[in-house]
């Protein structure tokens, strides 16, 4: 099975900061990498699909990059509503939709 | 508008059974890959099961042989039959649609339904 490892597990930042979260796959997943945001008590929300495509309706301050085994999610200027937990997910070896362990983004 | 609404969660004793439902609107369940994902209290996301458009099903090892995913095309509803439930199955269960025209990303999610397995 493909393992997904996110770093860091938690992150403190301020409004206006630029933030980067990293996700590494245990083997190449080409560009089959998706990012989700989850606010407390809410369902996950798709942000980025296919490594770098912005889901409709998602603010342009969110961006994704990478291919193969190494991927990043960048938030260019943090807004108050961005403080949440972020998950990467590989969809290369379907049916096993492996998720990363999550990165909790907190207010500094 | 695409919408997914789960129901059927609740408190069940270890060894018991429960059936979750996911009513879809705004799209056709049978024309899409559909999945179940769960989240134990305070933990991360865990994929549980998928059903393809052709009806093929797959399961995580943790639920294989105990859970069954299915759909009712006439009701446009996805189901998860859960048998032989264990304490470690306690979680919020989400249904989600996978976009099989792209990268199989989970583009729409339900609000979740809580399953608690406890005596």
Image (spheres, rainbow, N blue to C red):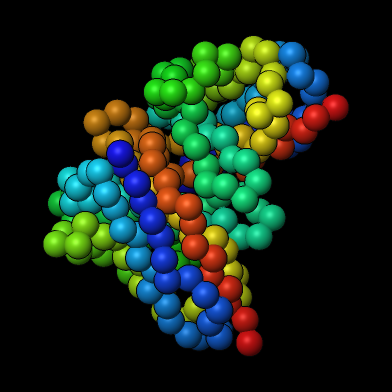
At horizontal 63% and vertical 18% (from top left) the residue drawn is A75
Image x and y of residue A12, in percent: 81, 28
Give the vertical position of B12 relative to B50 (above or below). Answer: below
Give the vertical position of B37 relative to A91 (above or below). Answer: below
Q: Nearer the viewer, residue B65 or B115?
A: B115
Residue B58 seen anywhere in this rendered image of the structure:
no
Image quadrant where one finds the C terminus of chain A? top right
The image shows a total of numbered marks equal to: 0
Give the vertical position of A47 relative to B80 (above or below). Answer: above
In the rendered structure, the answer to whether residue A103 lies left or right of residue A25 reads right
Image x and y of residue B8, in percent: 42, 71
Q: Nearer the viewer, residue B84 or B11?
A: B11
At horizontal 50% and vertical 78% (from top left) the residue drawn is B85
Image x and y of residue B35, in percent: 36, 52
Quarter of image, res A73: top right
At horizontal 58% and vertical 69% (from top left) the residue drawn is B90
Q: State the residue lying farthest toward the front.
A: B1
Give the vertical position of A7 relative to B43 (above or below). Answer: above
Q: Nearer the viewer, residue B77 or A69?
A: B77
Residue B33 seen anywhere in this rendered image of the structure:
yes
In the rendered structure, the answer to whether residue B31 lies left or right of residue B95 reads left
Image x and y of residue A104, in percent: 71, 37
At horizontal 54% and vertical 65% (from top left) the residue drawn is B114
In the rendered structure, the answer to whether residue B78 lies left or right of residue A8 reads left
């Amino acid at each position: 099975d493909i393992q997904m490892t996110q770093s860091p597990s938690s992150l403190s930042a301020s409004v206006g900061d630029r933030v980067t979260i990293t996700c590494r796959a245990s083997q190449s997943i080409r560009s089959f990498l998706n990012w989700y945001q989850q606010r407390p008590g809410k369902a996950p929300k798709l942000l980025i699909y296919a490594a770098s495509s912005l889901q409709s309706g998602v603010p342009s301050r969110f961006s994704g990059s990478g291919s193969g085994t190494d991927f990043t999610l960048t938030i260019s200027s943090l807004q108050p509503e961005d403080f949440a937990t972020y998950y990467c997910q590989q969809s290369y070896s379907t049916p096993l939709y492996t998720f990363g362990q999550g990165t909790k983004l907190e207010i500094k | 508008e695409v919408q997914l609404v789960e129901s059927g969660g609740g408190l069940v004793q270890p060894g018991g059974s429960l059936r979750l439902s996911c009513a879809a609107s705004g799209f056709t369940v049978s024309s899409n890959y559909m999945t179940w994902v769960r989240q134990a209290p305070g933990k991360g996301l865990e994929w549980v099961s998928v059903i393809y458009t052709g009806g093929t099903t797959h399961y995580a090892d943790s639920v294989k042989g105990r859970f069954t995913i299915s759909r009712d095309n006439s009701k446009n509803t996805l189901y998860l039959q859960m048998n032989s439930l264990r304490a470690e199955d306690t979680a919020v269960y989400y249904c989600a649609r996978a976009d099989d025209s792209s990268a199989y990303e989970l583009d729409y999610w339900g609000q979740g339904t809580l399953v608690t397995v406890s005596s």
